[in-house]
Image (tube, grey):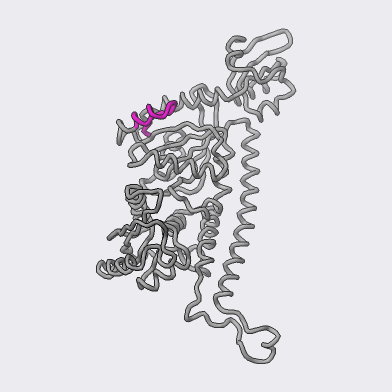
Amino acid sequence: MPYNEALGTTLIERAFRERIVLVGVTLPPNDEADTDASLDELALLVDTAGADEVARLTQNRDRPDPQYFIGKGKAEELKQVCLALDADTVVFDNELTPAQQYNLEQLLGRTALDRTAVILDIFAQNAHTQEGKAQVELAILRYRLPRLRRGAKASMSQQAGGIGTRTRGKGETKLEVDRRAIQRRIDHLVRDLAEMQRTRTLQRKGRSRSGLLNVTIVGYTNAGKSSLLNRLTSAGVLAEDRLFATLDPTTRRLALPGGEPVLLTDTVGFVRRLPHGLVESFKSTLEVASNADYLVHVVDASAPDPEGQIDAVHEVLTEIEAAAVPELLVFNKADLDPESADRLAKLHEGSVAISAQTGAGIGTFLDTLSDRLRAMARITELLVPYDRGDVIAAVRREGEVVSEEYTDDGVRIRARLGAASVGRLGAYVVASGASDRAASEMS
């Protein structure tokens, strides 16, 4: 899928399924088991991108080789493996510098990519909205800019000789022209995304004025976030058993067991070592997590390393300044591995095990989420005149009524309300901030 006809295509061509050799290097403090697990995930990423693993090569090193990342001898071995298997491309699980990538391609005589390039390629395939496409293109261009190379065809864009050339200088190489073209495109995309972010901020403020709490679903890619949203709201979001099937956030209204409504948003999935350029480019999309009132952190209980996936999600949440948002851990796919789901739920106190596919555990999940949100809400007491039935209806619609008392002056209502609702109904508020225990005693 071309991301920009003027600047090239996505990072992996898909006229056929490429044959890929994977390369992993174990560096301190990791061990070989960490490298094997990461390579297994890279193989899934490569498959999602539309290519096939034909071999993998590993090496233990104290530090990366500055020229080839792997040692010169290992690089020669890699070349022989590629020749023997007729491999099209090598993909390193580690991040390559532009110089290392160039040196490897010169030695191997074939394309050398890193994990970042594969993830960017998958995002390019799955971006469908205008904002998603712009975010992916921005990340790809930022990745490519330092990797532009001076080749045999880097001819001058202006004639070096002729009248007037002494005042114009020696002209510009094609490399310099390409760099400026990419930088102009980057600047244009940054401006476009800033405008889209302003629109998103206005939409978020509009939702905030509704008085509804915002609950955001986060988690590792392919953990079942979209499946959970579909199960709870019939949203109809694409849910496939592959990595990064959905990139664009989707928000739906959800009524909790007590009747109180919330806004539930599905987000892009995370992955180990999610490229920083992607996090930067998708910042406006990922802000939905940092601005949430509560996070539902979905974990694939059947995954080989669910704890590692939890840590990877927490790393991204920290990077987008969402680590302080309270979360509910939800271990999904209990239908595939019930023992693992139950074990993880017991290990993480307060978490729940569910199957978004079959619906098992959904009732427990909703009750737990409802209790968590109810515990967060402040108890507000209002005195509403009898002739303001619209205000009474708004309180019932936007919050959870704890008690109602009919007095000579009007209806005295104690309810759990969001900050936006309290502000909008301020004229009728007589007390705010009572604890749940106090509210129960009053009722």
Name the residue at 46% across, 42% down.
313
Q: Position of residue 287 (x, y in %)?
A: 57, 44
Q: Residue furthest top?
A: 408
Name the residue at 48% across, 46% down.
268
The verdict on residue 200 being magenta is no
- Residue 338 shown left or right of residue 99 in the figure: left
The image quarter containing residue 108 is bottom left
Instruction: Pick the quarter of the image with the N terminus.
Output: bottom left
User: How many labels were placed on the picture?
Assistant: 0
Instruction: Pick the quarter of the image with the C terminus.
Output: top right
- Residue 321 shown left or right of residue 96 in the figure: right
The verdict on residue 342 being magenta is yes
Q: Position of residue 64 (x, y in %)?
A: 42, 60
The image quarter containing residue 166 is bottom right
In this rendered view, identify the residue nearer to me: 63 or 96.
63
Q: Residue furthest bottom?
A: 162
Q: Position of residue 379 (x, y in %)?
A: 63, 19
In this rendered view, identify the residue nearer to me: 65 or 208.
65
Name the residue at 59% across, 39% down.
291
In this rendered view, identify the residue nearer to me: 128 or 342.
342
In this rendered view, identify the residue nearer to me: 5 or 82.
82
* Picture layout, residue 419 above or below residue 305: above
Which residues, given as a range, are shown in magenta? 341-355
* Picture layout, residue 90 above or below residue 338: below
- Residue 36 shown left or right of residue 406 in the figure: left
Q: Position of residue 299 (x, y in %)?
A: 41, 37
